[in-house]
Structure formats: C-alpha cells, structure tokens
Image (cartoon, rainbow, N blue to C red):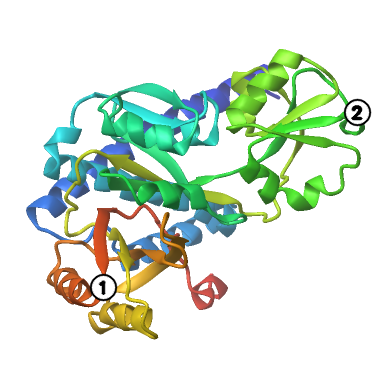
Amino acid sequence: MATLDEIRQDITQLDQELLALLAKRKGLSIEVARAKQANPRPIRDHQREQELLVALIQKGRVLGLDAQYITQIYHTIIEDSVLSQQAYLQSLLNPQQQEPMTSVAYLGPRGSYSSLAARKYLARYKDQVIEVNCQNFREILDVVESGRAAFGVLPIENTSSGSVNEVYDVMQHTSLSIVGELTYPIEHCILTAVPTELNRIKILYAHPQPLVQCSHYLSKLEGVRHEICDSSSSAMMKVKELASPDAAAIGSAAGGELYGLHVLAEQLANQKENYSRFIVVARKPIDVVPQIPAKTTLIMSTSQQPGSLVEALLVLRNHDINMTKLESRPVQGNPWEEMFYLDVSANLQTPEMQAALVELTNITRYIKILGCYPSEDVKPTTVPPVLMGNM
C-alpha cells in the first residue's frame, strides 16, 4: 500500500494538473468571446449550458461522482467563464479601462467587506490596484470625483438587512456614474485576538449593518455590549489592539486572517444565504456591449398627483422593460417629497430604453441616469427534474 505521504503527493500532482486544465479552459472562454465579437451573439447560451451539465452529470455518475457535486463545480466554472467573457468584450468597447494599474476607494481599512468586494471585482480587469481607505460613503464619492481614485465601491443592499439607505442618499448629489456591480457573499464570524470562550465576551465591536444582519444570533448572547464602528475592518483592528479575551468583533474569516484573529463562532446571519450587492462608480460612464445583459439605474421625481408613480412605471411595462429594483428616499430639504431609484434590465442604448426615457422625461418632474453597466447576476443553469430523474 502507498504511504500517506505518497498519496498526498499524488493529490498534489492532480491538483496541479487540474489548475492547468482550468487555466486552459479559461483561455478557451476568451476565444469564444472573440468569436462572438466577430459574429455578435449573446454571451450566455442557456440551452448549451444545460446540455453540458446533463452530459457531465451522466458521465460523472458512471465515474462514481454525485450529481450535486458536479453541478456545484460547473456552476462556478460557468460563472467565471461568463464574467471573463463580459470583461474581455467590455475592455474592447471601453479602451480607457485597459490600463493595467488602477485605484479604488472603499469603506474602512483593508479587510472590510467593501475591500474584499473591490478586490474581487477589479481582479478581472486590472493587474495592480492601489487601495484608498475611506471613513464614510460621502468620502468615497469625494475621492473619486476629485480624481484621487479611479473607482469607488459602495454596498447598496443586503439580502438580510435590506437597502443601505445612506448610499442612496449620497448618490442623489453626485456627478459620478455607476459602471459596474457585483454580489459578494457575506459570512459573518465572531473574531477574537486571543483564544477565549464565547461566554467570556463582554463587548462586541461591529459596523451597524452586521449587527442588524445577525440580530437573531446576537439576541442570545447575554450581557454583551455592542460598540459601533465605522467599518468591519475598524472593528477587527480595535479587537487586535485590545488583545483581550473579553473583546470580539464581527467580520469575515478572510478579514480576520489579515489581522491575525481567531474565529470563535461563524454562520451568524439571520438568513443562511447572506449576500451584499455592491455598485462601482467612476467619473465617466461606460458603454455596454449589446450581447451582454445590462442594467440601467436612474432616479426620478414624479408630480404629487395621485397615480403619478404608477403612470411612470406603466411606461416601462409598455416598452417591455423589466424593473428589478424600486427604492424611495426623501428629498433632502424638501419635506414629504420623495426621489425614486429604479434598476431596470435594459441597455441604455436600445431603442426601447431611449423611447421610454423620452416618455418619462415628459411626465416626471426630474429624471437622471446614474449609469448603464453589465449585469453580473449570473444565475446558475438549471437541470430540469425530469432530466435528473432519467439519469
């Protein structure tokens, strides 16, 4: 029989071969994008993806591999392929984004969820990123508007705690454009600087959002005082500085690792699947390749007459434009007046969207486009149960 070391060497060799194959597959994905550039076609072909998954599940079962295992792996591979193709085509249409180095502003020091999201987003576009730490959302916009950073990353909503209202409020008064989005998994942990027990914790440092998102779990911790911090990374830095068995922070395991913290408890969120959606802003708008699914974000103020909002939304329906988000926020300085934020699944350059904007301009008091950008909501390809049952 092979020794444990020999078995581990074989596993290491297989892992290296897998990495080489994944890199080769990624390269072929870019070749597919080039072919679709020459002969414009949508990035995603759902029928082909479904057929691929069915064939792989059938082949995998012969090899003793579980169907769920295969679908999880290939959902990740397909998502990366789609986003890589989108990034490639977008770089051709927007040559100003092809520079290898850029800068990004986000909330808190490194290790915050915003910093992790910024790194994930820009990794597909840039080789080197200079990070600019900010203390609040207004500062992020100021840094980008002044040219001290090329991009800003801001959280806009969370599946557990809902919209980040402060971001909507500061976006009312910016000249920046939304140029991208991403959804990032939020996996809250209780982190400590020294090994300790959960019942010894007396003070918990956290940003307000994680406190809301983990309220059910935290309600069971008796005698623990909450101390508000301006970011999750600030909370982790404070705990590291104190190095006390009585102090803990809420943050990510990846962020905690940067600060040498220990994970005391995990999976704290009220919802099992906890995600935050981030927007990426820049000084100039971008164009979106027609074959890429696009989103357009706009703000508008309707008249105070009954049914005025319904009338505006009917314009979208009449042009077959799907609205994915509607958020109302008070207009600062104008009591009882509201500004409406809308996300629609449409490319700003399409005739349907242009016609809808003309009509909306005629019936609203104010309208402004905040940005048109690629949608990064890559929904997993489904395999019909009837096909699964026949395998």
Dot 2 crowding, Cα within 10 Å, few <14, some 14–19, many 20+? few
Residue type at the position of mark 1: Thr
Where is residue 121 shown, x and y percent of the image?
38, 38
Residue type at the position of mark 2: Arg
Task: Name the residue at the left extreme.
Answer: 38
As drawn, is 28 to the left or to the right of 69? left
Q: Nearer the viewer, residue 337 or 266?
A: 337
* Image quarter of residue 301: bottom left
As drawn, is 30 to the left or to the right of 158? left
Residue position for label 2: 200
Where is residue 222 shown, x and y percent of the image?
91, 42
As drawn, is 230 to the left or to the right of 180? right
Q: Secondary structure at mark 2?
A: helix
Q: Which numbered tag is attached to residue 316? A: none
Where is residue 349 shown, x and y percent of the image?
14, 62
* Image quarter of residue 199: top right
In percent of the image, x 87 and y 33: which residue is there?
198
Select label 2 or label 1 by which is in front. Answer: 1
Residue position for label 1: 364
Where is residue 77 shown, x and y percent of the image?
41, 46
Give the position of the N terminus as an image quadrant.
top right
Q: Nearer the viewer, residue 270 or 150?
A: 150
Earlier-in-chain disc, 2 versus 1: 2
Q: Relative to residue 373, is residue 364 depicted above or below?
A: below
